[in-house]
Amino acid sequence: MCYSSSIYKPWLAGQFRTTPYPTNMINPTGTIGNVLGDARAETDKLLSDSFVETPDFLALSTTNDFNFVVGRRGTGKSALFIRLQKFFRDNRLWVIKDAPKEYEALELHATIEKITDDYRQARAIVRIAWRVSALITILCEAEKHYKFCKSESYDYLNKFKTNHSSLLKSSTFKRCTQIIQTCIKPSESIALIPSVIASAFEVEHLQKNISAALVHIKKRIIFLFDNLDEGWQPRRTDSAVLGGLAATAAEFRDSQSPIHVLLFIRDNTFRALSVFDQDFSRHIEGNTLRLRWNKDGLFHLVALRLRKFFDIHDIENDTKIWNRFAKNDISYKTGFEKCLQHTLYRPRDILVLLNCTYSIASRSGRKEVIESDLDEASRQISQDRMQDLLKEYETVFPGLELLILHFKGHSAVLDYEKFTMELETIISESTFSDQKESDFAILSNAKQAFYALFSIGFVGMHDVATNNYIFCHDGSPATIDVTQHDQKVCIHPCHWKALNLEVSDLQDIPLDQIHDDLKTERNPAVQDFRMKLIGQLISELPKTPPGNEGAAQFEDWVFRAVRILFSGKLNNFQLKPNSNSVQRRDIVATNNGDKGFWRRILEDYSTRQVTFEVKNYEKIGPDEARQATSYLSGPYGNFIIIVTRGKNEGLTESEKSWIKEMWDQHKKMIFTIPSDALGRCISKLRKSTERFDYTEDFLTKRLDIFVRHYLSLKIKR
């Protein structure tokens, strides 16, 4: 948020405010609030006076052709939702609106997930539950009409209300959950649940009687749903909840009932639905209106709001109004188009940008904005978005920050091959001295790193067929199809300023055709992708044959595992660093010795260079023990780790005796770790809150067992 600090007013006599007023309170011109209104329709005081009646609005308000209104975040769905309510009510239509709370949506999603993870089964259950819930909501509205009691359906509907009185006070979303929970029977087949719900609530008879009552009282119902992305994640069950509601809307339309349903859906949610729902083209696609804005529409939107700001109502020319606000290089329509270059052609983008730009101008005591104000505002907004992005992923995938910041000062558009070469350089040259770099070992290659950046919307791919850049922020199933190495990759425009990116020619980047849905919240797909990679690594272990046949494969597995687990605590990992020497150590890493287990190793065993010996068999014997001891001298200290294929974490009596003998005779600690234990430590990384604690605890307790028990035993041969 921007702040204005040139004028302060006393709170009380002799006392003055020492911090600046935020722009949403006051600015030096005396204007209260953001000059172009709030970016959120729900709190925008200028919406009623400055709403642009676009062709989209006219289509929705004058026809029944559409059930689905789809748009990216910030394209005006909520504004349209609010304005349509007013229009329908002004025209004496009954409007029922429903915007679920997050906790209501999460409860419904969780209820379905407990029953099934199959999309078609989940959609069938939710579809009938939605239909019943919507009909009950309509019944509660219809009974308020004075003619309702004279309807032929009155007796049946009144009895229905009495029988199901416990559901009447709930919201449509909550009621949908209650209906499903009421009809679940543990012993019953999942496939029977829809018919159980239909029978319990006599849904066909209920709809027939409600439709008859609406005809009798001569009323048509408009059902508006917004905020359908609350609690939504790109999973089958979550999409099935929306798919069921979409099918309900189609049913009301196909039955030609006096009930019309409009769903306002975010673009990413809609795209996921198109993937999961096999009936998408039949029920949904043909009844969808997509919200899009062009330069002229946005210019008119801004001009309407500036008229309110300047209190000018006798000038119809939008350019003249704009020139009252913008001067020099950003005046006239060409200047406004310069402003649009810092946006994705969405109302929210331009309102936020111009509000901030004006606030910056206000600090200098000016009522007009100039290009330097615009540059500062766009940079500030870009930096804020970058920080939001990094904060959201600092626990889920902290290594992403290192990948993103590497591109600071680069070109905004690169060939896919060049972009992935940059990623490969980051991963291959990593010393793993930073704990965040452990994620590079999880990613393992540039292609997987690119997918991670694509999944959070940092980069988009150029679609040659449509000349669009496709961005993904939601984790909905998306295919990265790179058919040519020179295919273009574009870093998201909202990050250009924060990263000081070079943009050679904006004409080559159609900003108004960027398909994305930027949302500052954690993307579960990134965490799911990371978990998938961890799972793949763990699953590779049992597939590796023991002995010489799988020795090289096992060595690579251990090398990757220790980098994942110990990055930041150890650094500069090397595989076979002295392969030409007589003493050929398998893996060596430098011990930072900052704290915990590894500080203990440095202080108690004088080990700055930590050696990992990799043995692709279950047990160690005297030869392995003597060989390991021979490696320990100078900076390698008196501590070595041997990773084995042991099935148990405990040691055989023979192994214990050799470990004790090497300690008694040479004061060298041979510390064995079975590979399954390393795999378990890696599996704990799936829970970000336990990322490094479990491994530290395991190593500390295991070393205590070696010291307290194995080193005090009597040697047995």
Image (cartoon, rainbow, N blue to C red):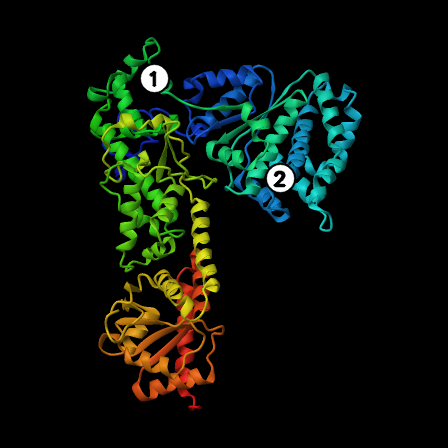
Residue 471 visible to an observer of this rendering: yes
Q: Quadrant of the C terminus?
A: bottom left
Q: Residues within 10 Å of mark 2 (few under 14, many from 20)?
A: some
Q: Does residue 87 lie above or below 457 as drawn?
A: above
Identify the residue at horizontal 37%, vertical 74% (top origin): 642
Q: CA distance from mark 2 to mark 1?
A: 48 Å
Q: Does residue 677 lie above or below 223 as drawn?
A: below
Which residue is more in the foreground, 688 or 455? 455
Instruction: Tell me residue 620's x, y (percent).
Output: 41, 79
Q: Quadrant of residue 344?
A: top left
What label sits on residue 120 in the rendered view?
2
Instruction: Tell me residue 169's x, y (percent).
Output: 66, 35
Q: Which residue is mark 1?
A: 303
What label sits on residue 90 in the rendered view?
none
Which residue is more in the foreground, 107 or 21? 107
Instruction: Tell me residue 240's x, y (percent).
Output: 58, 38
Q: Is 197 placed left or right of 608 in the picture?
A: right
Residue 687 visible to an observer of this rendering: no
Q: Is 144 placed left or right of 386 in the picture?
A: right
